[in-house]
Image (cartoon, rainbow, N blue to C red):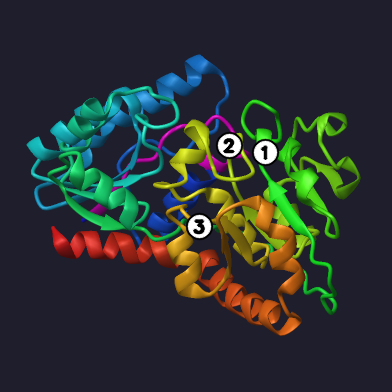
Amino acid sequence: MNCYLSRNYKGLSSAGNKAKTDIEQIMEGMSFKNVGLKQTTYRNEVLAFLFTLVGVLKSPFCLRKGDNLVLQYPLKKYFTFVCNMAHLRGAKVIVLIHDLGSFRRKALTVEQEIKRLNHADYVIAHNEKMKKWLEDNGCKAKLGVLEIFDYLSETQATPKPDVEKPYSVLYAGALNLRKNTFLYEVGEFIHSFSFNLYGNGFEIDKAKGKEHFKYMGFVKSDDLIATAQGDFGLVWDGFSVSACTGNFGEYLQYNNPHKTSLYIRCELPVIIWSKAALADFVRKNSIGICIDSLEELEGILSSLSKEQYMEMKKKVHQLSTKLSQGFYCKEAVRNAIYEI
């Protein structure tokens, strides 16, 4: 029997929780059995803790010899316990990584992280770069890759009228100075196109070239898919326009930002840092542009022909359909079950 463990999520609006609940929905659609309690969204700290704890304690008693259990990582303090109990019951554990605590948050040392993950039989990394990092740092579990996060939504992108230059760029996410200082510097290098910002916390008066920005505020993801204003979605993080720097920026070299999947569901070609792990996926699928620096963006967009843009748009449309159907998660999990 194939199983997964549901838990409490403190709301569904964050990108992290959206990715995890999507995977639970995909598992359910694959006829996997939930060995925890029914998924809940309590925000109250005590209720959230109790429901997750009871589900964790219940899960081993639902497992049998030969079962495969899919866990979403991190599961914080419960992870090692669940893995050990699953193995005692004769089950195998497949782990799908969402976040590595030894990177941005520095919640664990690298050694602690690898020690935890070595309790799994199979680990699904985001991409080949993360897989290699895990191998190089001593992960002994069998390893596979997701490639990109799926993005479930009944909403479809609204077909747009004929695209005309200059192209506009959309950015969705944290807009504050602390996380994304680059947003306050990039306006210096914009001359012809507009930057459409979706999210909270943007202080437009502090931004250089503020006349090039359109601050749209926070929009729920389903609404954004239907109403996104822009021709490209930008994947960039950190302090600098010349490279993705700082803990958030450097993490792009290993992780799959969920916003990339959101942009694709909005049917927007992607602009991404050339050293980001997902840049390989963008190149392979011809769904956007990989750049070294945002200082190059004006020239690249100016020289891009309408025909080149429409070819990217066509490929993005095809990929959006796959993401809406859970294609990549299903493939990764099936491969894991086959391997173990």
Q: Which mark is residue 182?
A: 1
Tell me: residue 283, above or below residue 202.
below
In contact (CB < 8 Å): disc 1 and disc 2: yes
| Helix, strand or loop status at disc 1 | helix
Q: Is 44 in the magenta?
A: no
Question: Is tag 1's residue or tag 2's residue first in the polypeptide sequence?
Answer: 1
Q: Is residue 127 left or right of residue 289?
A: left
Residue most extreme to the top: 46
Specify whether residue 92 is in view: yes
| Helix, strand or loop status at disc 2 | loop
Q: Is residue 14 left or right of residue 301?
A: left
Report the span colored magenta.
Answer: 2-17
The percent position of residue 183, horizontal first and vertical second, equals 72, 39
How much space separates mark 3 and mark 1, taking CA atoms?
Answer: 16 Å
Give the labeled residue for mark 3.
Answer: 274
Q: Nearer the viewer, residue 23 or 102?
A: 102
| Helix, strand or loop status at disc 3 | loop
On the rendered image, what quadrant is the N terminus found in?
Answer: bottom left
The percent position of residue 322, horizontal first and vertical second, equals 50, 71
Q: Amino acid at mark 1?
A: Phe
The crowd level at tag 3 (other Cα within 10 Å; few <14, some 14-19, many 20+) is some
